[in-house]
Image (spheres, rainbow, N blue to C red):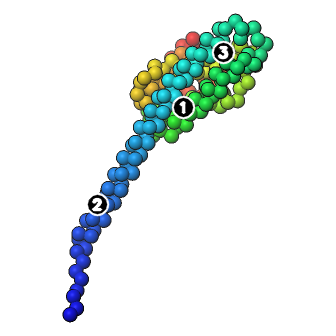
Amino acid sequence: MKQHLRIPWAQVLIVCAALVMAFGMGTSVQADREAAEQRETFRRNLQMLDQYLYDLSEDLGDPDILSLEAPLEDGRIQESLIRLRRTVVALNQNGASGAGRETTRNPHVHPYLLALEETLLGSNYPDPDALSQVLTVCRPLWDVETGLSYEDTLTRLEENVTSGDYQDALDLLGIGDLIPTTTQGGT
Protein backbone atom coordinates (compact mmCIF):
# COMPACT_ATOMS: atom_id res chain seq x y z
CA MET A 1 0.00 0.00 0.00
CA LYS A 2 1.09 3.31 -0.93
CA GLN A 3 1.05 5.95 1.78
CA HIS A 4 1.03 9.53 0.89
CA LEU A 5 3.27 11.77 2.81
CA ARG A 6 1.42 14.77 3.96
CA ILE A 7 3.79 17.61 4.61
CA PRO A 8 2.32 20.29 6.83
CA TRP A 9 3.59 23.23 4.79
CA ALA A 10 2.09 25.81 7.10
CA GLN A 11 4.01 24.40 10.05
CA VAL A 12 7.23 24.21 8.06
CA LEU A 13 6.86 27.85 7.04
CA ILE A 14 6.18 28.90 10.62
CA VAL A 15 9.27 27.06 11.85
CA CYS A 16 11.38 28.65 9.08
CA ALA A 17 10.06 32.11 9.95
CA ALA A 18 10.82 31.51 13.62
CA LEU A 19 14.37 30.46 12.76
CA VAL A 20 14.89 33.54 10.61
CA MET A 21 13.61 35.79 13.39
CA ALA A 22 15.74 34.05 16.01
CA PHE A 23 18.83 34.38 13.82
CA GLY A 24 18.07 38.04 13.21
CA MET A 25 17.60 38.70 16.90
CA GLY A 26 20.81 36.82 17.68
CA THR A 27 22.86 38.96 15.32
CA SER A 28 21.19 42.06 16.74
CA VAL A 29 22.12 41.00 20.27
CA GLN A 30 25.67 40.27 19.10
CA ALA A 31 25.91 43.68 17.41
CA ASP A 32 24.60 45.37 20.56
CA ARG A 33 27.16 43.51 22.66
CA GLU A 34 29.99 44.50 20.32
CA ALA A 35 28.86 48.13 20.35
CA ALA A 36 28.78 48.08 24.16
CA GLU A 37 32.30 46.62 24.22
CA GLN A 38 33.52 49.34 21.84
CA ARG A 39 31.97 52.04 24.02
CA GLU A 40 33.60 50.56 27.12
CA THR A 41 36.96 50.36 25.34
CA PHE A 42 36.59 54.01 24.29
CA ARG A 43 35.86 54.96 27.91
CA ARG A 44 38.88 53.02 29.23
CA ASN A 45 41.13 54.55 26.56
CA LEU A 46 39.94 58.01 27.57
CA GLN A 47 40.86 57.25 31.19
CA MET A 48 44.30 56.04 30.10
CA LEU A 49 44.78 59.14 27.96
CA ASP A 50 43.93 61.29 30.97
CA GLN A 51 46.69 59.59 32.98
CA TYR A 52 49.21 59.73 30.13
CA LEU A 53 48.60 63.45 29.60
CA TYR A 54 48.98 64.06 33.32
CA ASP A 55 52.28 62.14 33.32
CA LEU A 56 53.52 64.10 30.30
CA SER A 57 52.59 67.43 31.88
CA GLU A 58 54.49 66.40 35.03
CA ASP A 59 57.50 65.34 32.96
CA LEU A 60 57.46 68.64 31.08
CA GLY A 61 57.78 70.44 34.41
CA ASP A 62 60.79 68.35 35.41
CA PRO A 63 63.96 70.52 35.40
CA ASP A 64 66.08 67.59 34.23
CA ILE A 65 63.95 67.21 31.11
CA LEU A 66 63.75 70.96 30.53
CA SER A 67 67.54 71.15 30.57
CA LEU A 68 67.86 68.68 27.70
CA GLU A 69 68.47 70.10 24.24
CA ALA A 70 66.23 67.41 22.78
CA PRO A 71 63.62 66.26 25.32
CA LEU A 72 62.81 63.27 23.15
CA GLU A 73 66.13 61.83 24.31
CA ASP A 74 64.51 61.21 27.68
CA GLY A 75 63.00 57.73 27.96
CA ARG A 76 59.99 58.98 29.93
CA ILE A 77 59.07 61.45 27.20
CA GLN A 78 59.50 58.82 24.52
CA GLU A 79 57.33 56.38 26.45
CA SER A 80 54.68 59.04 27.12
CA LEU A 81 54.47 59.92 23.44
CA ILE A 82 54.24 56.27 22.41
CA ARG A 83 51.42 55.66 24.89
CA LEU A 84 49.63 58.86 23.85
CA ARG A 85 49.86 58.03 20.17
CA ARG A 86 48.61 54.47 20.66
CA THR A 87 45.75 55.62 22.85
CA VAL A 88 44.64 58.36 20.46
CA VAL A 89 44.69 55.88 17.57
CA ALA A 90 42.58 53.48 19.66
CA LEU A 91 40.18 56.28 20.65
CA ASN A 92 39.78 57.27 17.04
CA GLN A 93 39.18 53.68 15.94
CA ASN A 94 36.66 53.04 18.72
CA GLY A 95 35.02 56.40 18.20
CA ALA A 96 34.71 55.87 14.47
CA SER A 97 33.55 52.26 14.60
CA GLY A 98 31.20 52.73 17.54
CA ALA A 99 29.84 56.09 16.47
CA GLY A 100 26.63 55.08 14.70
CA ARG A 101 23.93 57.52 15.76
CA GLU A 102 26.43 59.61 17.68
CA THR A 103 27.93 60.90 14.42
CA THR A 104 24.80 62.86 13.66
CA ARG A 105 24.55 64.20 17.22
CA ASN A 106 28.26 64.99 17.49
CA PRO A 107 29.49 65.68 13.95
CA HIS A 108 32.76 67.37 14.96
CA VAL A 109 34.13 64.66 17.23
CA HIS A 110 35.46 62.39 14.50
CA PRO A 111 37.22 65.17 12.54
CA TYR A 112 38.86 66.31 15.79
CA LEU A 113 40.00 62.79 16.71
CA LEU A 114 41.26 62.19 13.19
CA ALA A 115 43.23 65.47 13.13
CA LEU A 116 44.60 64.70 16.60
CA GLU A 117 45.74 61.26 15.50
CA GLU A 118 47.39 62.59 12.35
CA THR A 119 49.13 65.38 14.27
CA LEU A 120 50.46 63.15 17.02
CA LEU A 121 51.66 60.51 14.58
CA GLY A 122 53.27 63.02 12.24
CA SER A 123 55.13 65.31 14.64
CA ASN A 124 58.62 65.07 16.08
CA TYR A 125 58.46 67.70 18.86
CA PRO A 126 62.12 68.76 18.81
CA ASP A 127 61.97 71.07 21.88
CA PRO A 128 59.93 71.55 25.08
CA ASP A 129 57.77 74.28 23.52
CA ALA A 130 56.81 72.04 20.62
CA LEU A 131 56.25 69.18 23.02
CA SER A 132 53.91 71.30 25.15
CA GLN A 133 51.71 71.61 22.05
CA VAL A 134 50.76 67.98 22.62
CA LEU A 135 48.99 69.09 25.79
CA THR A 136 47.34 71.95 23.93
CA VAL A 137 45.95 69.84 21.08
CA CYS A 138 44.71 67.18 23.51
CA ARG A 139 43.04 69.66 25.87
CA PRO A 140 39.51 69.37 24.39
CA LEU A 141 39.69 65.63 25.03
CA TRP A 142 41.62 65.87 28.30
CA ASP A 143 39.07 68.26 29.79
CA VAL A 144 36.24 65.74 29.33
CA GLU A 145 35.47 64.13 32.67
CA THR A 146 36.40 60.49 32.87
CA GLY A 147 33.75 58.08 34.03
CA LEU A 148 30.98 59.49 31.85
CA SER A 149 28.97 57.23 29.59
CA TYR A 150 30.12 56.89 25.99
CA GLU A 151 27.29 59.11 24.75
CA ASP A 152 27.93 61.77 27.41
CA THR A 153 31.65 61.70 26.65
CA LEU A 154 31.04 62.32 22.96
CA THR A 155 28.54 65.06 23.76
CA ARG A 156 30.99 66.77 26.11
CA LEU A 157 33.80 66.47 23.56
CA GLU A 158 31.51 67.95 20.90
CA GLU A 159 30.74 70.84 23.26
CA ASN A 160 34.44 71.38 23.93
CA VAL A 161 35.41 71.31 20.26
CA THR A 162 32.71 73.77 19.25
CA SER A 163 32.84 76.04 22.31
CA GLY A 164 35.54 78.38 21.05
CA ASP A 165 37.48 77.87 24.27
CA TYR A 166 39.83 75.46 22.50
CA GLN A 167 40.38 77.43 19.29
CA ASP A 168 44.14 77.34 19.84
CA ALA A 169 44.04 73.53 19.85
CA LEU A 170 41.92 73.40 16.71
CA ASP A 171 44.24 75.87 14.96
CA LEU A 172 47.31 73.79 15.87
CA LEU A 173 45.53 70.75 14.44
CA GLY A 174 44.75 72.67 11.25
CA ILE A 175 40.98 72.37 11.63
CA GLY A 176 40.20 75.71 13.27
CA ASP A 177 38.42 76.97 10.15
CA LEU A 178 36.56 73.70 9.56
CA ILE A 179 34.72 73.51 12.87
CA PRO A 180 32.22 76.24 13.67
CA THR A 181 32.34 77.53 17.22
CA THR A 182 29.48 78.77 19.34
CA THR A 183 31.56 81.51 20.96
CA GLN A 184 34.92 83.03 20.27
CA GLY A 185 36.66 82.30 23.54
CA GLY A 186 40.21 81.20 23.72
CA THR A 187 42.37 80.16 26.57
N-terminal of the pair, mark 2 or mark 3, is 2
Q: Residue furthest top?
A: 63
The amino acid at mark 2 is: Ala
On the picture, is 168 further left or further right than 107? Answer: right
Q: Which residue is mark 2?
A: 18
> What is the distance, in whole Å, between disc 2 and disc 3 at their CAs?
60 Å
Picture layout, residue 30 above or below residue 187: below
Kindly report the distance in space between the C-alpha atoms of the residues bearing marks 1 and 2. Answer: 39 Å
Considering only order in the chain, which callout, 2 or 1, is on the residue closer to the N terminus?
2
Q: CA distance from mark 1 to mark 3?
A: 21 Å
Please name the residue shown 59% across and 33% down the image.
89
Q: Residue furthest bottom?
A: 1
Q: Secondary structure at mark 2?
A: helix
Q: Judge by depth and name the residue closer to the eye, 5 or 100.
A: 5
Q: Nearer the viewer, residue 149 or 41?
A: 41
Q: Is residue 180 left or right of residue 19?
A: right
For residue 100, what is the image quadrant? top left
Q: Residues within 10 Å of mark 3 (few under 14, many from 20)?
A: some
According to the picture, the residue beneath numbered tag 3 turns out to be 132
The amino acid at mark 3 is Ser
What residue did someone put label 1 on? 91
Check whether the beta carbons of the residues at disc 1 and disc 2 lie within 8 A of each other. Answer: no
Mark 3 falls on what kind of element?
A: helix
Residue 168 is at least partly visible in this image: no
Residue at 22% in and 74% down: 8
Q: Residue 117 appears at what percent x and percent y?
A: 62, 30
Vertical side of 186 occupied by 104: above or below: below
